[in-house]
Image: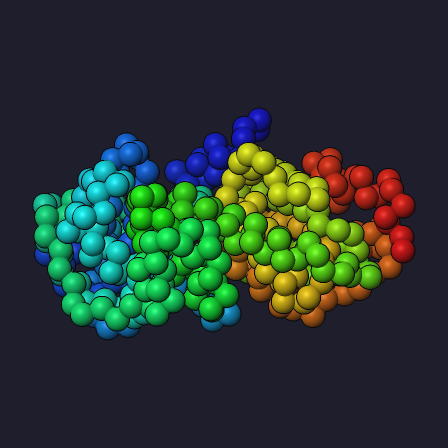
Amino acid sequence: MGMGKGAYLKKITTNVQQWRTVEVGERLDGSSPPSVFIGNYGYPRVDVGPMIAPYEGDTAILDTPETWIPGKKSQEDIIRFRLDLVRGKHRVGIKELDNRLVGKLQEISLARDSVDSEAQFRHKPRGFTFNEDHQPFGPSGSIERFDIGNVRWERNLEKSFYDTDLLAADAVADAFHEGVLFSQIQKAFSTGTMGLRKNRKLVPTRWSITAVDSALADHLYDEVRHLDVIDSFHVYEFASLNNYYSVILTPTPWQYEWIEAFIHIMGKEEMIFADHESLRPKSGYSSVGGCYYSCKFAVLEAMKRMGKQAGAIVLREAYEGYVPLGVFNVRENVRNALLQPHREFLSFRDSLNYVSTRLRLPLSRFMEQGVLMREMLSSRQTTL
Protein backbone atom coordinates (compact mmCIF):
# COMPACT_ATOMS: atom_id res chain seq x y z
CA MET A 1 0.00 0.00 0.00
CA GLY A 2 2.18 2.84 -1.28
CA MET A 3 0.75 6.06 0.14
CA GLY A 4 1.90 8.87 2.39
CA LYS A 5 0.83 9.18 5.99
CA GLY A 6 -1.69 11.94 5.36
CA ALA A 7 -3.49 9.94 2.67
CA TYR A 8 -3.39 6.81 4.82
CA LEU A 9 -4.90 8.49 7.89
CA LYS A 10 -7.50 10.21 5.75
CA LYS A 11 -8.52 6.80 4.45
CA ILE A 12 -8.84 5.51 8.02
CA THR A 13 -11.06 8.44 9.01
CA THR A 14 -13.41 7.84 6.07
CA ASN A 15 -13.85 4.26 7.30
CA VAL A 16 -14.77 5.24 10.87
CA GLN A 17 -17.95 3.48 11.90
CA GLN A 18 -21.15 5.45 12.26
CA TRP A 19 -20.98 6.66 15.84
CA ARG A 20 -24.15 8.03 17.33
CA THR A 21 -23.85 11.76 17.77
CA VAL A 22 -25.86 14.13 19.93
CA GLU A 23 -29.26 15.29 18.59
CA VAL A 24 -30.02 19.02 18.82
CA GLY A 25 -32.45 21.45 17.22
CA GLU A 26 -32.00 24.90 15.71
CA ARG A 27 -31.80 26.47 19.18
CA LEU A 28 -29.22 25.29 21.68
CA ASP A 29 -28.80 26.25 25.33
CA GLY A 30 -25.78 24.65 26.92
CA SER A 31 -22.24 25.06 28.13
CA SER A 32 -18.96 25.48 26.24
CA PRO A 33 -16.15 23.48 27.98
CA PRO A 34 -14.71 26.22 27.05
CA SER A 35 -14.04 25.34 23.42
CA VAL A 36 -13.79 27.03 20.04
CA PHE A 37 -13.00 25.83 16.54
CA ILE A 38 -11.31 27.76 13.74
CA GLY A 39 -11.53 26.04 10.35
CA ASN A 40 -8.96 26.26 7.56
CA TYR A 41 -11.08 25.70 4.45
CA GLY A 42 -11.16 28.84 2.29
CA TYR A 43 -8.28 30.49 4.19
CA PRO A 44 -7.89 33.48 4.72
CA ARG A 45 -11.71 33.53 5.12
CA VAL A 46 -12.60 30.66 7.43
CA ASP A 47 -15.49 29.23 9.42
CA VAL A 48 -15.24 30.07 13.11
CA GLY A 49 -17.47 29.32 16.04
CA PRO A 50 -17.98 27.93 19.50
CA MET A 51 -18.22 24.28 20.51
CA ILE A 52 -21.17 23.77 22.84
CA ALA A 53 -22.43 20.80 24.83
CA PRO A 54 -26.25 20.56 24.92
CA TYR A 55 -26.31 20.65 28.72
CA GLU A 56 -25.27 23.17 31.33
CA GLY A 57 -22.66 23.08 34.06
CA ASP A 58 -19.04 21.94 34.13
CA THR A 59 -18.30 20.41 30.70
CA ALA A 60 -14.51 20.90 30.88
CA ILE A 61 -13.78 17.19 30.47
CA LEU A 62 -15.08 17.31 26.89
CA ASP A 63 -12.14 19.45 25.76
CA THR A 64 -9.35 18.85 28.28
CA PRO A 65 -7.30 16.00 26.76
CA GLU A 66 -4.67 16.31 29.51
CA THR A 67 -7.16 14.64 31.89
CA TRP A 68 -8.25 11.70 29.73
CA ILE A 69 -5.32 9.29 30.01
CA PRO A 70 -4.64 9.89 33.74
CA GLY A 71 -8.41 9.48 34.21
CA LYS A 72 -8.23 6.12 32.39
CA LYS A 73 -10.76 7.19 29.77
CA SER A 74 -11.17 4.71 26.94
CA GLN A 75 -11.17 5.53 23.24
CA GLU A 76 -14.95 5.08 23.30
CA ASP A 77 -15.27 7.47 26.27
CA ILE A 78 -13.28 10.14 24.44
CA ILE A 79 -15.28 9.77 21.24
CA ARG A 80 -18.53 10.05 23.21
CA PHE A 81 -17.23 13.19 24.93
CA ARG A 82 -16.29 14.78 21.64
CA LEU A 83 -19.45 13.87 19.74
CA ASP A 84 -21.43 15.71 22.42
CA LEU A 85 -19.88 18.97 21.19
CA VAL A 86 -21.91 20.95 18.65
CA ARG A 87 -19.91 23.26 16.39
CA GLY A 88 -21.26 26.61 15.32
CA LYS A 89 -19.95 28.09 12.06
CA HIS A 90 -19.74 31.64 10.73
CA ARG A 91 -17.36 32.81 8.00
CA VAL A 92 -14.98 35.68 8.74
CA GLY A 93 -11.60 36.93 7.59
CA ILE A 94 -8.68 35.95 9.79
CA LYS A 95 -7.90 39.63 10.62
CA GLU A 96 -11.48 40.49 11.62
CA LEU A 97 -10.77 40.47 15.34
CA ASP A 98 -13.30 43.27 15.91
CA ASN A 99 -16.13 40.99 14.74
CA ARG A 100 -18.70 40.53 17.57
CA LEU A 101 -18.71 36.74 17.30
CA VAL A 102 -14.89 36.63 17.22
CA GLY A 103 -14.83 38.76 20.37
CA LYS A 104 -17.03 36.20 22.15
CA LEU A 105 -14.83 33.37 20.90
CA GLN A 106 -11.82 35.17 22.33
CA GLU A 107 -13.59 35.43 25.67
CA ILE A 108 -14.35 31.70 25.61
CA SER A 109 -10.75 30.83 24.72
CA LEU A 110 -9.48 32.86 27.68
CA ALA A 111 -12.02 31.44 30.14
CA ARG A 112 -11.02 29.60 33.32
CA ASP A 113 -14.25 27.62 33.48
CA SER A 114 -17.09 26.37 31.32
CA VAL A 115 -19.16 29.16 29.74
CA ASP A 116 -22.98 29.31 29.61
CA SER A 117 -23.89 29.59 25.93
CA GLU A 118 -26.97 30.14 23.77
CA ALA A 119 -26.93 29.60 20.03
CA GLN A 120 -29.45 29.92 17.23
CA PHE A 121 -28.59 27.94 14.09
CA ARG A 122 -29.85 28.56 10.58
CA HIS A 123 -30.65 24.86 10.24
CA LYS A 124 -30.47 21.88 12.55
CA PRO A 125 -26.77 20.94 13.03
CA ARG A 126 -25.83 17.64 11.40
CA GLY A 127 -23.02 15.12 10.97
CA PHE A 128 -19.78 14.61 12.85
CA THR A 129 -16.08 15.02 12.06
CA PHE A 130 -12.98 12.88 12.62
CA ASN A 131 -9.52 14.18 11.69
CA GLU A 132 -5.96 12.98 12.17
CA ASP A 133 -4.80 16.38 13.50
CA HIS A 134 -7.56 17.65 15.78
CA GLN A 135 -10.02 15.89 18.04
CA PRO A 136 -13.40 14.72 16.71
CA PHE A 137 -16.57 16.72 17.26
CA GLY A 138 -20.28 16.28 16.74
CA PRO A 139 -22.82 18.02 14.49
CA SER A 140 -22.11 21.37 12.83
CA GLY A 141 -24.38 24.17 11.70
CA SER A 142 -24.28 27.78 10.55
CA ILE A 143 -24.81 30.04 13.52
CA GLU A 144 -27.12 33.06 13.32
CA ARG A 145 -26.99 34.30 16.91
CA PHE A 146 -24.69 33.53 19.81
CA ASP A 147 -24.66 34.77 23.38
CA ILE A 148 -22.57 33.84 26.42
CA GLY A 149 -22.85 34.35 30.16
CA ASN A 150 -20.28 35.94 32.44
CA VAL A 151 -16.71 34.77 31.84
CA ARG A 152 -13.76 34.67 34.25
CA TRP A 153 -10.48 34.79 32.35
CA GLU A 154 -7.43 32.67 33.12
CA ARG A 155 -5.07 35.18 34.71
CA ASN A 156 -1.92 34.37 32.70
CA LEU A 157 -3.79 34.33 29.39
CA GLU A 158 -5.45 37.63 30.26
CA LYS A 159 -2.01 39.15 30.86
CA SER A 160 -0.77 38.19 27.37
CA PHE A 161 -4.05 39.40 25.80
CA TYR A 162 -3.41 42.93 27.04
CA ASP A 163 0.35 42.87 26.34
CA THR A 164 0.37 43.73 22.66
CA ASP A 165 4.16 44.18 22.64
CA LEU A 166 4.84 40.56 23.65
CA LEU A 167 5.74 38.11 20.88
CA ALA A 168 3.30 35.21 20.50
CA ALA A 169 6.04 32.60 21.05
CA ASP A 170 7.01 34.32 24.32
CA ALA A 171 3.36 34.49 25.41
CA VAL A 172 3.02 30.75 24.76
CA ALA A 173 6.19 29.98 26.75
CA ASP A 174 5.19 32.26 29.63
CA ALA A 175 1.76 30.63 29.95
CA PHE A 176 3.32 27.16 29.86
CA HIS A 177 5.81 28.00 32.61
CA GLU A 178 2.95 29.38 34.71
CA GLY A 179 1.23 26.00 34.52
CA VAL A 180 -1.48 26.80 31.98
CA LEU A 181 -2.61 23.62 30.21
CA PHE A 182 -1.47 23.08 26.63
CA SER A 183 -5.09 22.83 25.46
CA GLN A 184 -5.88 26.24 27.01
CA ILE A 185 -2.82 27.88 25.46
CA GLN A 186 -3.65 26.45 22.03
CA LYS A 187 -7.22 27.78 22.09
CA ALA A 188 -6.08 31.23 23.15
CA PHE A 189 -3.43 31.24 20.42
CA SER A 190 -5.95 30.18 17.76
CA THR A 191 -8.31 33.08 18.47
CA GLY A 192 -5.66 35.76 18.01
CA THR A 193 -5.23 36.77 21.66
CA MET A 194 -1.42 36.60 21.64
CA GLY A 195 1.38 38.43 19.92
CA LEU A 196 2.17 41.89 18.63
CA ARG A 197 -0.96 43.93 17.95
CA LYS A 198 -0.24 44.26 14.23
CA ASN A 199 0.35 40.52 13.81
CA ARG A 200 -2.70 39.16 15.62
CA LYS A 201 -5.08 37.02 13.61
CA LEU A 202 -7.21 33.90 13.81
CA VAL A 203 -5.23 30.68 13.33
CA PRO A 204 -7.02 27.51 12.15
CA THR A 205 -7.28 24.99 14.96
CA ARG A 206 -5.26 22.27 13.24
CA TRP A 207 -2.45 24.73 12.46
CA SER A 208 -2.49 26.29 15.92
CA ILE A 209 -1.97 22.90 17.58
CA THR A 210 1.28 22.31 15.70
CA ALA A 211 2.32 25.95 16.08
CA VAL A 212 2.07 25.73 19.88
CA ASP A 213 3.75 22.31 20.03
CA SER A 214 6.57 23.64 17.87
CA ALA A 215 6.94 26.93 19.78
CA LEU A 216 7.14 25.11 23.12
CA ALA A 217 9.54 22.51 21.74
CA ASP A 218 11.86 25.24 20.39
CA HIS A 219 11.71 27.10 23.70
CA LEU A 220 12.50 23.97 25.71
CA TYR A 221 15.28 22.97 23.31
CA ASP A 222 17.02 26.28 24.02
CA GLU A 223 16.87 25.49 27.75
CA VAL A 224 17.79 21.80 27.50
CA ARG A 225 20.70 21.93 25.05
CA HIS A 226 23.07 23.36 27.68
CA LEU A 227 22.33 20.67 30.29
CA ASP A 228 24.55 17.70 31.11
CA VAL A 229 23.93 14.52 29.12
CA ILE A 230 22.49 11.42 30.81
CA ASP A 231 25.00 8.63 31.45
CA SER A 232 23.09 5.53 30.27
CA PHE A 233 20.28 4.46 27.95
CA HIS A 234 16.81 4.93 29.45
CA VAL A 235 13.71 3.14 28.14
CA TYR A 236 10.23 4.37 29.02
CA GLU A 237 7.00 2.65 27.95
CA PHE A 238 3.29 3.33 27.89
CA ALA A 239 0.24 1.79 26.25
CA SER A 240 -3.27 3.23 25.88
CA LEU A 241 -5.95 3.99 23.28
CA ASN A 242 -4.84 1.06 21.07
CA ASN A 243 -1.26 2.37 20.98
CA TYR A 244 2.08 1.28 22.43
CA TYR A 245 4.93 3.78 22.89
CA SER A 246 8.58 3.15 23.67
CA VAL A 247 10.83 6.14 24.37
CA ILE A 248 14.59 5.47 24.29
CA LEU A 249 16.68 8.30 25.74
CA THR A 250 20.29 8.09 24.59
CA PRO A 251 23.45 9.43 26.34
CA THR A 252 24.14 11.88 23.50
CA PRO A 253 23.50 15.55 22.79
CA TRP A 254 20.03 16.29 21.41
CA GLN A 255 18.93 14.18 18.48
CA TYR A 256 15.42 12.96 17.83
CA GLU A 257 13.75 10.30 15.73
CA TRP A 258 10.06 9.42 15.53
CA ILE A 259 9.04 6.11 13.96
CA GLU A 260 5.42 4.96 13.97
CA ALA A 261 3.78 1.81 12.69
CA PHE A 262 0.09 1.29 11.92
CA ILE A 263 -0.67 -2.43 12.07
CA HIS A 264 -3.78 -4.00 10.56
CA ILE A 265 -5.99 -0.95 11.12
CA MET A 266 -8.02 -1.49 7.95
CA GLY A 267 -6.92 -4.99 6.95
CA LYS A 268 -3.52 -6.64 6.67
CA GLU A 269 -1.53 -3.46 6.07
CA GLU A 270 1.60 -2.56 8.03
CA MET A 271 2.44 1.09 7.40
CA ILE A 272 5.58 2.69 8.88
CA PHE A 273 6.44 6.40 8.81
CA ALA A 274 9.50 8.17 10.22
CA ASP A 275 11.33 11.47 10.49
CA HIS A 276 14.31 12.78 12.46
CA GLU A 277 16.60 15.67 13.32
CA SER A 278 20.15 15.91 14.65
CA LEU A 279 21.61 18.55 16.98
CA ARG A 280 19.35 21.35 15.76
CA PRO A 281 15.55 21.64 15.27
CA LYS A 282 14.30 20.47 11.91
CA SER A 283 13.82 23.04 9.17
CA GLY A 284 10.65 22.74 7.13
CA TYR A 285 7.51 20.83 8.05
CA SER A 286 7.85 17.19 9.03
CA SER A 287 6.73 14.54 6.55
CA VAL A 288 4.90 12.71 9.36
CA GLY A 289 2.79 15.72 10.32
CA GLY A 290 1.86 17.30 13.62
CA CYS A 291 2.58 14.25 15.78
CA TYR A 292 6.32 14.84 15.20
CA TYR A 293 6.10 18.14 17.09
CA SER A 294 3.69 16.86 19.75
CA CYS A 295 6.10 14.06 20.65
CA LYS A 296 9.13 16.36 20.49
CA PHE A 297 7.51 18.81 22.91
CA ALA A 298 6.64 15.98 25.33
CA VAL A 299 10.21 14.63 25.28
CA LEU A 300 11.86 18.03 25.78
CA GLU A 301 9.39 18.85 28.56
CA ALA A 302 10.52 15.69 30.38
CA MET A 303 14.21 16.54 29.89
CA LYS A 304 13.67 20.00 31.37
CA ARG A 305 11.94 18.37 34.34
CA MET A 306 14.85 15.91 34.76
CA GLY A 307 17.47 18.63 34.39
CA LYS A 308 19.34 16.51 31.82
CA GLN A 309 19.92 16.44 28.07
CA ALA A 310 19.65 13.34 25.88
CA GLY A 311 18.84 12.09 22.45
CA ALA A 312 15.45 10.48 21.90
CA ILE A 313 14.25 7.68 19.67
CA VAL A 314 10.51 7.14 19.98
CA LEU A 315 8.74 4.09 18.57
CA ARG A 316 4.97 3.86 18.29
CA GLU A 317 2.69 1.03 17.26
CA ALA A 318 -1.02 1.61 16.58
CA TYR A 319 -3.19 -1.50 16.55
CA GLU A 320 -6.48 -2.76 15.16
CA GLY A 321 -9.32 -0.68 16.58
CA TYR A 322 -7.24 2.52 16.51
CA VAL A 323 -9.18 5.63 15.50
CA PRO A 324 -7.46 8.96 14.68
CA LEU A 325 -8.36 11.28 17.56
CA GLY A 326 -5.89 14.11 16.92
CA VAL A 327 -2.26 14.59 17.85
CA PHE A 328 -3.13 14.95 21.53
CA ASN A 329 -3.02 11.13 21.41
CA VAL A 330 0.73 11.25 20.81
CA ARG A 331 1.49 14.21 23.08
CA GLU A 332 -0.35 12.87 26.12
CA ASN A 333 0.75 9.24 25.68
CA VAL A 334 4.42 10.25 25.41
CA ARG A 335 4.04 12.61 28.37
CA ASN A 336 2.59 9.76 30.42
CA ALA A 337 5.31 7.36 29.22
CA LEU A 338 7.96 9.73 30.53
CA LEU A 339 6.31 9.85 33.94
CA GLN A 340 6.71 6.08 34.38
CA PRO A 341 9.70 4.33 36.00
CA HIS A 342 12.35 3.61 33.38
CA ARG A 343 14.76 0.75 32.64
CA GLU A 344 18.47 1.49 32.23
CA PHE A 345 20.88 -0.17 29.80
CA LEU A 346 24.58 0.24 29.14
CA SER A 347 24.33 -0.07 25.35
CA PHE A 348 21.94 0.91 22.60
CA ARG A 349 21.87 -2.69 21.41
CA ASP A 350 20.75 -3.89 24.85
CA SER A 351 18.00 -1.29 25.00
CA LEU A 352 16.79 -2.30 21.53
CA ASN A 353 16.88 -5.97 22.48
CA TYR A 354 14.53 -5.19 25.35
CA VAL A 355 12.22 -3.01 23.25
CA SER A 356 12.04 -5.72 20.58
CA THR A 357 10.33 -8.00 23.11
CA ARG A 358 7.59 -5.39 23.54
CA LEU A 359 6.83 -4.70 19.89
CA ARG A 360 4.49 -6.67 17.66
CA LEU A 361 6.46 -5.93 14.50
CA PRO A 362 10.03 -7.17 14.15
CA LEU A 363 12.50 -4.47 15.17
CA SER A 364 14.04 -4.76 11.71
CA ARG A 365 10.96 -3.08 10.25
CA PHE A 366 11.66 0.03 12.35
CA MET A 367 15.36 -0.15 11.51
CA GLU A 368 14.51 0.06 7.80
CA GLN A 369 13.00 3.52 8.38
CA GLY A 370 15.17 4.71 11.26
CA VAL A 371 18.11 6.80 10.11
CA LEU A 372 19.38 7.60 13.61
CA MET A 373 18.73 4.04 14.78
CA ARG A 374 21.00 2.64 12.08
CA GLU A 375 23.66 5.29 12.69
CA MET A 376 23.76 4.59 16.41
CA LEU A 377 24.00 0.83 15.95
CA SER A 378 26.93 1.25 13.60
CA SER A 379 28.77 3.81 15.73
CA ARG A 380 30.74 3.64 18.96
CA GLN A 381 27.86 5.42 20.68
CA THR A 382 26.23 2.04 21.26
CA THR A 383 28.41 1.38 24.32
CA LEU A 384 29.62 3.61 27.08
Q: By what rule are the colours in the image chosen? A: rainbow
In-front residue for pair 271/31 = 31
Rendered location of residue 64, percent (x, y): 39, 63
Q: Tell me the residue at 21%/50% (across/down).
A: 102
Up-down relation of residue 150 to residue 266 (above or below): below
In-front residue for pair 35/272 = 35
In-front residue for pair 252/290 = 252
Q: Tell me the residue at 84%/43% (across/down).
A: 377
Q: Tell me the residue at 33%/54% (across/down).
A: 164
Q: How many marks?
A: 0
Rendered location of residue 171, percent (x, y): 43, 57
In the displayed structure image, the side of residue 369 where residue 232 appears, left or right: right
Q: On the image, which quarter does residue 51 sit in? A: bottom left
Up-down relation of residue 8 to residue 197 (above or below): above
Looking at this view, name the residue that lies furthest to the top. Answer: 2
In the displayed structure image, the side of residue 202 where residue 88 appears, left or right: left
| Residue 249 in view here | no
Rendered location of residue 260, percent (x, y): 62, 44
Q: On the image, which quarter does residue 130 sit in? A: top left
| Residue 293 in view here | yes
In the displayed structure image, the side of residue 313 where residue 164 appears, left or right: left
Q: Tell me the residue at 69%/70% (across/down).
A: 341
In the displayed structure image, the side of residue 123 where residue 355 appears, left or right: right
Rendered location of residue 238, percent (x, y): 62, 61
Which part of the image, by quadrant, shows the N terminus? Answer: top right
Which part of the image, by quadrant, shows the C terminus? Answer: bottom right
